Amino acid sequence: MNAIMTGNPNIGLPTNLGGPGPMGAGAGAGPAAPHGAPHNNAVEVNRDEMEAIRRLQALGGFSEAAAVQAYFACDKNEEFAANFLFESAFEDESAMMQAAVA
């Protein structure tokens, strides 16, 4: 298993990967950190998942954190995650252009 640090947990994923949420009870990196303990935002992935995340990164130069978040937010569907990443990048670029014009 590989551990990946996911950056900002508020983008595309529930903040507590060990608890109930959109991905189901118990999904994610294991038990939540005890109350008051720091949450390190690490996600454990197997070899196949890591390869899928690396392919997502290579598609458009996306960060590891963005690729991990998209992959898990799309229920480990690599095609959906790729679409999500490209659409998010396009929306971010459009918002920056609109802000620059305003």
Image (cartoon, rainbow, N blue to C red):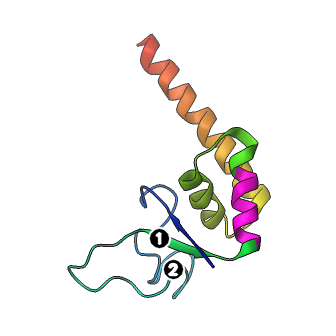
Question: Which quadrant does the N terminus fall into?
Answer: bottom right
Q: Secondary structure at mark 1?
A: strand
- Looking at the image, residue 44 sits to the left or right of residue 51; the answer is left
Q: Which quadrant holds residue 54?
A: bottom right
Specify start and end residues of the magenta stretch as a single range: 48-56
Characterize the magenta stretch by its predominant secondary structure: helix
Report the disc number at residue 2.
none
Q: In this view, which residue lies farthest toward the left?
A: 36
- Looking at the image, residue 39 sits to the left or right of residue 77; the answer is left
Q: Which residue is mark 1?
A: 42
Residue 7 picture location, percent across and down: 44, 56
Q: Which residue is mark 2?
A: 29
Q: In this view, which residue lies farthest toward the front?
A: 2
Is 55 in the magenta?
yes
Residue 60 picture location, percent across and down: 71, 39
Q: Residue at x 71, y 70 (%)?
A: 49
Q: Residue at x 41, y 75 (%)?
A: 16
User: Foreground: 62 or 99?
Assistant: 62
